[in-house]
Amino acid sequence: TTPISLDLNNIQGDILSGLPKKTQYYIFFKIQDAAKFRSDLAHFIPLIKTVAQVLKDRDDIDDHKRRGQPGLIPLVGVNISISHFGFVKLGIDDSTLAPNGTEDVFVKGQKQDAITNLGDPKRADGNPDWEDAFLNEIDGLIIISGESHATIEKKKHEIEHIFGVHTHHASIQEVKSIRGDVRPGDQSGHEHFGFLDGISNPTVNGFDTNVNPGPKSVDPGKVLVGQTGDPTPTREDWAKDGSFLVFRYLFQLVPEFDKFLEEHPLKKDGNGKDLTPEKGSELLGARMVGRWKSGAPIDVSPFQDDPELADDPKRTNDFKFEGERTSQLKCPFAAHVRKTNPRDDLEPDFSIDDRRILRRGVQFGPEVTRAEHNSGKTIHDRGLLFTCYQSHIENGFQFLQQSWANTANFPPFTGIGNATGLDPLIGQGDRAMSGLDPLSPQNVLPIDTFIIPRGGEYFFSPSLKALKENIAT
Ligand code: HEM
């Protein structure tokens, strides 16, 4: 096999390295004037942060810290992606992204997919029950990432200026802009239910060095189109080094989630030890997710949290539900991390590499208020701007959501069929699961809905070369 060599100057930064993301703008836009957009784009391209530049920024930050300099250095990163509708508007033939009827979903768009495959709740008019903005056509997405609100605000103005937004000659119109923020203080890195996120992402051959124990690295073609391992073998050259970006606007009902845990505490752990109501609720939450709030995996530490395990990168992803295909003692089959990465639950020759996604994204909305906590009812909108990258949406995000999270008899070898249940976080449909009580794993518990999809779209994040030579004029 030829050694893999990736051109990190050609790949948008969010894909492999993740943009630094204390705070981010997601700007969803519609193209108003295709010719002007293509020429404005030439002025926008220099703002794009590549993987190579993100890595350099990281070195600068480390340097800054090493020298004991105070404060954060101003940092900003910009990326852009285009939907199929955007390519059509630009007059660019994007059929190489969905050759021979594969990736139909990219061509149809997520709104259609939400109705037919993802299981999103519907309105009376047949549309998914999304925010109106996302029922419109969306042609592209600009992500601005930075260390402070002032920095990303300034960059947003600069970008609006390039595209002539707020003038008579605007080439784009903003359909919706959403600001995301990592959570404050010790909740930084934790999603709104309180669980540490961003722990398990696939490492990529030819990019990641010093790989920690855990699921094996994937070929770059699982994330980057046209690279070694891309399941679609023939692509036109301009598509190479791009990646499909899936965006989901996911609202989280945090007070309701907390109340559910409070109302269903486990009485005993798997060793038969009595639990206080508080500990019983904590264990229930950990069993729904497959990790403790600290991030420690329950497959390794099933009945009590272990913050040291959570903090040890050599151990926190080193588990595979080994020998547990028919056992939910340590971890329920339907736990979120087991549903979305079943590890040893599948046949050894199953090509799980095709199902791996690189998750990015950031939280939006304020912390839970006292009034919300006391009433157990959400008043303020909050959740996750879910973003993930893959070289094939139908193999990646769509498969995980439809065939795994929403499918009761997955994983396949549990021996209890539909009693296995849906993913208790993201599963859509008849929400129930077994395995929550380690001593009575056959008990099936109906689970309320805590995550509500309110919008989304499928995009393609092109390489710098494609942006310069094929898309900009
Ligand atoms: C892992 C929460 C939506 C796929 C995780 C983890 C948490 C979490 C706490 C464990 C931390 C980690 O392993 O990095 C959430 C929340 C969501 C959400 C709160 C929505 C608001 C989704 C969606 C998908 C998804 C929509 C895909 C359809 C995954 C995958 C993993 C994961 C693949 C890693 C599993 C592993 O490799 O062990 N999520 N998630 N998540 N989630 Fe989600």
Image (tube, rainbow, N blue to C red):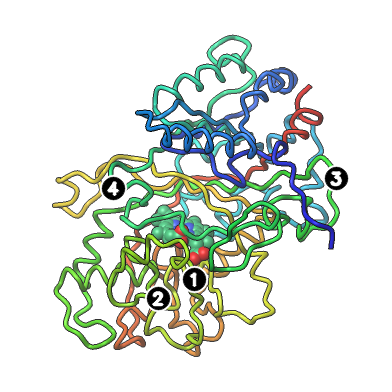
For the residue carrying disc 3, how many other residues have a C-alpha within 10 Å: few (<14), some (14-19), or many (20+)? few
Identified at 57% across, 14% down, the residue is: 161
Q: Are marks 2 and 1 in contact (CB under 8 Å)?
A: yes
- Residue 449: horizontal and vertical position, in percent? 35, 61
Kind of element beneath mark 4: helix
Disc nearer the start of the sequence (2/3): 3
> For residue 257, which quarter of the picture?
bottom left
Identified at 77% across, 34% down, the residue is: 466
Task: Report which residue position mark 4 lands on.
Answer: 186
Amino acid at pointer 1: Asp
Q: Which mark is residue 318?
A: 1
- From this viewpoint, which residue is outermost toward the top? 168
Q: Nearer the viewer, mark 1 or mark 3?
A: 1
Amino acid at pointer 3: Glu
Q: Are marks 3 and 4 in contact (CB under 8 Å)?
A: no
Kind of element beneath mark 3: loop
Task: Report which residue position mark 3 lands on.
Answer: 236
Disc nearer the start of the sequence (1/3): 3
Task: Report which residue position mark 2 lands on.
Answer: 300
Disc nearer the start of the sequence (1/4): 4
